[in-house]
Amino acid sequence: MNKDAAVRYFRDPPELTTPRLVLRRLKKTDYRDMYEYARDPLVTEFLTWNVHPSENYTLRYITYVLPKYRSGDFRDWAVVFRGNNKMIGTCGFTSLDFSHNSGEIGYVFNREYWGQGLAAEAIRAVLQVGFFDLNLHRIEAKYIEGNERSRRAMEKCGMSFEGLQRESMLIKESYRTIGVCSILRSEYRNE
């Protein structure tokens, strides 16, 4: 897929459904649910961004990113738990490399929903989009060393651990080692 086609795709991304989740466009009204997990230091411990200091901050963030759908520059889905219709996180593409037909995915989830296999469920839906809708050859995901929960979610989806990039990112004033997992289209099984 070329950049123009990807821009068209993400201007109005399709809703994705899994047995327990709906992945849909982020909405302004999601700000309270997002703030619930974005203010949690345990959730943000292994992320590149700091806790959100207020609901208003989260509302401003969502207001900032929503126009990026129109330009095709925002490639995250809001992850909604079907059991209670609560937005519990986001999952999507943090980057796409059109010259190499590859992409990187990222995700974050409310701690109340950890340990239930929901991250893997959302990741699988996004992998399917990457390989079948975007026609990617390779998709990777990264995690900060120590976040074994995230690595297990990646591996549960068929991604292979490739290695560690020692102190390769300066995050929150510390150099952090980054783990990389990936999957190729030829390895992907839609389970």
Image (tube, rainbow, N blue to C red):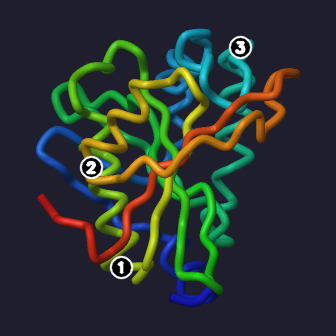
Asked if the residues shown at circle 2 and circle 3 are in contact, with their CB atoms under 8 angstroms apart, the answer is no
Q: Position of residue 49 (x, y in %)?
A: 72, 29
Nearer to us: label 2 or label 1: 2
Q: Position of residue 83 (x, y in %)?
A: 16, 28
Residue at the image position 56 percent from the left and 29 percent from the top? 31
Q: Position of residue 72 (x, y in %)?
A: 62, 71
Q: What residue does disc 3 label? A: 54
For label 2, the crowd category at 10 Å Cα-Cα, with few meaning under 14, some 14 to 19 and many 20 or more, is many
Distance from the alpha carbon under mark 2 to that under mark 3: 34 Å
Residue at the image position 43 percent from the left and 47 percent from the top? 161
Type of amino acid under label 2: Cys
Residue at the image position 11 percent from the left and 45 percent from the top? 19
Q: Earlier in the sequence, mark 1 or mark 3?
A: 3
Distance from the alpha carbon under mark 1 to that under mark 3: 37 Å
Q: Position of residue 44 (x, y in %)?
A: 61, 20
Nearer to us: label 2 or label 3: 2
Q: Observer-nearest residue: 151 or 31?
A: 151
Q: Earlier in the sequence, mark 2 or mark 1?
A: 1
Residue at the image position 33 percent from the left and 28 percent from the top? 86
Mark number, residue 157: 2
**93 sits to left or right of 39:** left
Q: What residue does disc 1 label? A: 133
